[in-house]
Amino acid sequence: MAEDVLERIQRVDNEPLTFQTADLIRPADLELKPLYQLHDRRYAVYWDRFTPGEWDDYQAEFRAAQARLKEEEAQALDIIRLGDSESELNHNLQSEISWPSTYRGRNCRDARSGGFFSFEANVAGGEPTRLFATFWGGERNRAFEILVDGTKIAYQELDNERPGDFIELSYDIPESLTKGKSKVTIRFEPLQDRTAGPVFGCRVSRR
């Protein structure tokens, strides 16, 4: 199989250290260059490997997941795309010792020891509400609290729960914290010497 892969990588004429895959990558073939030439653009070093049958299964699972996501977002009271400057600005994001970043093509934000990040989110005053947050399942040694308007609603540890995949966890927001309100402030705060997140996005929905 390794020989088959190498046979499908061809040198590009008149371009030093440049190669082109041939019927090897899905959904489209790629040009391969040394990393030092790609400092100003997004790049990938590793790829998932599929047989033709596995690729068909993956596509079907991906389409089903996208359909579920579209339905969930349509029903959400609010969606916060952490690491996205426009979404963070629209939700009055506040932070200390916290940085946006990108991982596996998705924006995210974390907070280091002594810091935090918070944002405002829409709620439906007094109705049963739930917060959904997306994390990378392979994170290790993460521990943090989640607060709503200064009241802790959850303590969360992340320690390699699902390596190689994103996970979405949910937290109930007590009705007493949303009663009479159209917005609340949600805050992620790491424990001492630990990290909160990265969090790839949050969604607030009715329970």
Image (cartoon, rainbow, N blue to C red):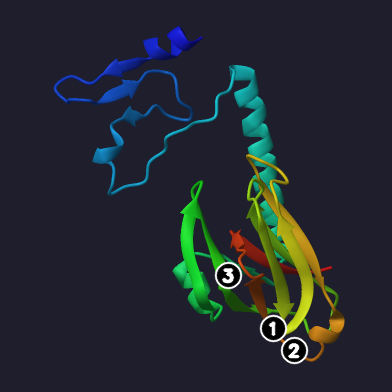
Q: Nearer the viewer, residue 145 or 88?
A: 145
Would residue 73 be visible to someone looking at this image? no
Name the mark nearer the viewer: 2 or 1: 1
Q: Nearer the viewer, residue 199 or 60?
A: 199
On screen, residue 42 versus residue 88, left or right, reads left
- Under mark 2, the amino acid is Lys
Query: Picture coordinates of residue 142 (x, y %)?
Result: 66, 58
For disc 3, the marked residue is 113
Which disc is residue 184 wearing?
Answer: 1
Res. 174 visible in picture? yes
Please state which amino acid type lies under the numbered disc 3: Ser
Circle 1 packing at 10 Å, graded few (<14), some (14-19), many (20+), is: some
In percent of width and height, residue 95 lies at: 52, 77
77 over 71 or under it: above or below = below
Q: Nearer the viewer, mark 3 or mark 1?
A: 3
Side of 17 where 201 appears, left or right? right
In the rendered image, residue 40, in percent from the top left (x then y), is placed at: 27, 49
Mark 3: few/some/many CA within 10 Å (<14, 14-19, 20+): some
Q: Are marks 2 and 1 in contact (CB under 8 Å)?
A: yes
Q: In front: 75, or 122? A: 122
For label 2, the SS is: loop
Q: Name the residue carrying label 2.
A: 181
Q: Real-space Cα distance between discs 2 and 3?
A: 31 Å
Q: Mark 2 or mark 3: which comes first in sequence?
A: 3
Instruction: Write the residue at 36% across / 29% down.
Output: 30
